[in-house]
Image: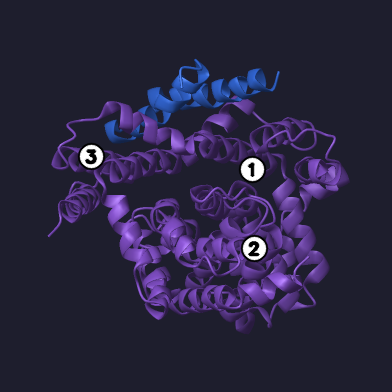
Chain colours: A blue, B purple
Amino acid sequence: MITLIYRGIIAIVMSFTVWNLYTEKKIALQANAAIVLIPLLLRLLMIK
Amino acid sequence: MSIELIIFLAMVVVFAGGCFLLKLPVSISMVLSSVVGALVGGQGIPLRHLVEGTFSYVDTILVIATAMIFMKVIQESGALDALSALIIEKFHKIPALLLCLIMLVIMFPGMITGSSTAAVLTAGSIMSPVLILMGVPMLETACIIAMGGILGMIAPPVNIPAMIIGGGIDIPYVGFEIPLAILTFPLAFLFVLMFGYKYAKKISYEEIAPKLNTEPREKFGFKVYIPIFAAIILMVVNKAVPQIPDLGMPLVFLISAVIGLFTGYKIDILKTCKEAINSVLPVLGILMGVGMFIQIMTLTGVRGLIVTSCISLPNLLLYVAMAISIPLFGAVSSYGAASVLGVPFLMAFLAKDQIITAAAISLIASLGDMMPPTALAGIFAAQVVGLKKYTDVLKRCIVPALILIAWAILIIVFSPQLAAILP
């Protein structure tokens, strides 16, 4: 149960990070958001 | 010159070049310096290690992100405005106490998120007009907010540098609350009085009262504070009643944020969450960069070089080296300083009480947030009050920084005696 909640929280944070990535104008800041997404995506999919 | 030193210098040069010459975000500069460090160390581009490094802080970024969502919700709902108006109304007759309470409000987001940026950007931005209204000049206001931010980041219950340092030698984050309170609150009260008392003692409540936002209190009454109480209760309930499972900080913040949607002004939750994540993305990116940076330092032997250099220093020099190197490394990141230098220094002080020493080292590491080029607390504090040059804030904070280092060293020296009298 707690794992599902944890993954849900990751999904929430990830979705807003993706939204910010798409609305961000500067490429450097888009890259910054992309770096943050890497571990979130891997943890959401329980790959790592 | 050893290969490890060459690798370290290459990483530092690329990092500084990325920040100062190319004006890249700190996180990107760190990724580049990590890649260059791996290349110089003959490791090619070790993708697995770079990704592995980001996982060092994955739980931390969840805490920061959800805490920021909570902070934005209570800001938008009117709870923070109500709290500051209440404090000023009740305590304006005792300016010293009022300043101390304002400092606590500034520290509060840092205390629950473990991020000085969260404190400066949320409570700092709310309390700065109040301090200026009280007659405190802009520069001193920025200094109060910056120091409040870094002390809030170290104050209990959440102290990420202490977690990082403790994690380095397998100390669980238990029993840190009282040492951290002893380390931070006296300094916070001293600094706010140092910067603000001579101006605030002439405070006129009649002049300030019309400018305070008392509407949330009048409109919603006590219920506007419920999300703050909910967060505090959910954080401590597991400690008071161990049968109740620990929910974890991210879930506590999200539950409290959801409560906050119904206790004050109506909030556009999607917009608020997007803004919250947007304001912490630079910090989250830095943490990912620090993770990669440290992973590559470990992979190439640079971390070993630093650890052995620290441990082999003579006893007296240890204190001097710690006082200089940890804040300087904070130019990369205060979390990075805690991880790379905090752990070896803690091992070097094995004769001292380890929990108190780890807490004191985390206090010194917090100064990294005042160290350019990152200087998160200084830069954001200057922005919040509308100062053009953040370097003035840093210069004005040199004396408090020295006091902070002296206090941390004093606590380390007397940690065995202190541990004997603490519960």
Residue type, mark 3 in image: Leu
Q: Would you say B320 lies left or right of B24 here?
A: right
Which sits in the foreground, A38 or A15?
A: A38
Q: Write down the residue under mark 2.
A: B180
Are the residues tagged 3 and 2 within 8 Å (C-beta)?
no
Q: Nearer the viewer, mark 2 or mark 1?
A: 2
Q: Nearer the viewer, mark 3 or mark 1?
A: 3
Are the residues tagged 3 and 1 within 8 Å (C-beta)?
no
Q: Residue at x 69, y 70 (%)?
A: B419
Return the mark for residue B32.
3
Q: Nearer the viewer, mark 3 or mark 2?
A: 2
Q: Would you say B237 lies left or right of B47 here?
A: right
Tell me residue B89's x, y (percent).
Answer: 80, 65
Query: Of callouts 3 and 1, which one flags the residue occurring earlier in the amino acid sequence?
Result: 3
Query: Of callouts 3 and 2, which one flags the residue occurring earlier in the amino acid sequence?
Result: 3
Q: Residue at x 53, y 30 (%)?
A: B274
**Please, is residue B191 above or below residue B247 in the view?**
below
| Figure disc tally | 3
> Chain ID for label 1?
B
Q: Write down the residue under mark 1.
A: B71
> Chain ID for label 2?
B
Residue type, mark 2 in image: Leu
- Image quarter in which the N terminus of chain B is found: bottom left
Element at label 1? helix
Element at label 2? helix
Q: CA distance from mark 2 to mark 1?
A: 22 Å
Residue type, mark 1 in image: Met
**Please, is residue B91 above or below residue B293 in the view?**
below
Query: Of callouts 2 and 1, which one flags the residue occurring earlier in the amino acid sequence?
Result: 1
Q: CA distance from mark 3 to mark 2?
A: 35 Å
